[in-house]
Image (spheres, helix red, strand yellow):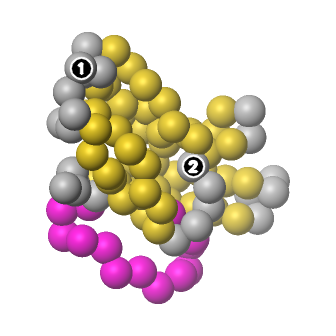
Amino acid sequence: MTIWKWTVVPTDEQKILVPRGAKFLCCQLQFNMPTLWALVDPATEKVNRTVYTIGTGNYCELPTNAQYLGTYQIQDGRLVFHVFIGEDEL
């Protein structure tokens, strides 16, 4: 097992390719970029996961199985986003 990271953008939904069964740890800013970290087995097949980024006060419809990863702020706290990850996709 090893820890991998992915940089994401503040958009409602985006797909990232990850090893199946990745255990997501958190989302924080690194060098002012929202970044996800997960514990992975690099030898497993890769699957898509959906990252949901929701701004405070914005309407959202999340899958019931979405996992909360964290909250980050940009522009000196004027914009606050909450990040969730969906289940493995085929």
Residue type pointed to by label 1: Ala
Q: What residue range appears in magenta?
A: 53-66
Q: Residue under label 1, please give it.
A: 43
Specify whether residue 61 is painted magenta.
yes
Amino acid at dot 2: Val
- Which quadrant holds residue 1? top left
The vertical placement of 22 against 84, above or below, is above
**Residue located 32% across and 53% down the image:** 49
Residue at image location 20% in from the left, 27% down from the top: 44
Give the Cα separation between the discs numbered 2 and 1: 23 Å
Q: Quadrant of the C terminus?
A: bottom left
Left or right for 30, reference 67: right
Check if residue 86 falls in the magenta segment: no
**Picture quadrant where residue 55 is located:** bottom right
Q: Is residue 62 above or below residue 66?
A: below
Q: Secondary structure at mark 1?
A: loop
